Image (cartoon, rainbow, N blue to C red):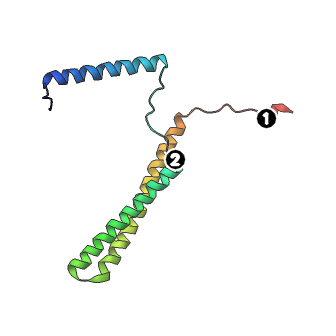
Amino acid sequence: MSSTPNGPHDKRKLDELGRRLSDLEKRAETTGTIPRKSTAEPNTALGSAMKLSTEFLAALVVGGGMGYLLDGWLETRPAFLLTGLAFGIAAGFFGVFRAARRMQAEDAEKAKTAPTLATRDDEDED
């Protein structure tokens, strides 16, 4: 037994529910009962390493795969495979470099907005 949708009536119900949930979330954030949503999660070292290695490996596989297919199609066994691998390595290095610069820029932006610790004057202790 399947239920039939009521069309505009169901959409109004969903819109009303969404509005009520948004209002509840805003009230909870202002009263401090739930923490504010963070805009971005911090990058972990393992996550960054996985992202960079995946970027490199994907470029290498695509370049090598295209070379392998071209070799099979044109019957020139190692020529296009080696050329594709070389282009894959170059594209992998370029992609890793670009991703690393992007992550570095994000970290620098986070450092600007991060709270700083108060420094202590060690010279006054003598």
Mark 2 Cα shell of 10 Å, populated few (<14), some (14-19), many (≥20): few
Task: Give the image quarter of residue 62.
Answer: bottom left
Residue at the spot 83% in from the left edge and 32% down from the top edge: 125
- Identity of the amino acid at label 1? Asp
The label number, if any, that marks residue 44 in the structure image: 2
Residue 29 position within the rendered picture, expressed as x and y whole percent measured from the top left:
45, 21
Residue at the spot 40% in from the left edge and 68% down from the top edge: 89
**Disc on the earlier residue, 2 or 1:** 2
Residue at the spot 15% in from the left edge and 21% down from the top edge: 9
Residue 35 position within the rendered picture, expressed as x and y whole percent measured from the top left:
48, 26
Check the picture and name the quadrant holding the C terminus: top right
- Element marked by disc 1: loop
Residue 50 position within the rendered picture, expressed as x and y whole percent measured from the top left:
46, 55
The outermost residue toward the right is 126
Residue 104 vertical placement versus 93 (above, below)? above
Q: Is 10 positioned to the left or the right of 48 in the image? A: left
Which residue is labeled 1 in the image? Answer: 122
- Element marked by disc 2: loop
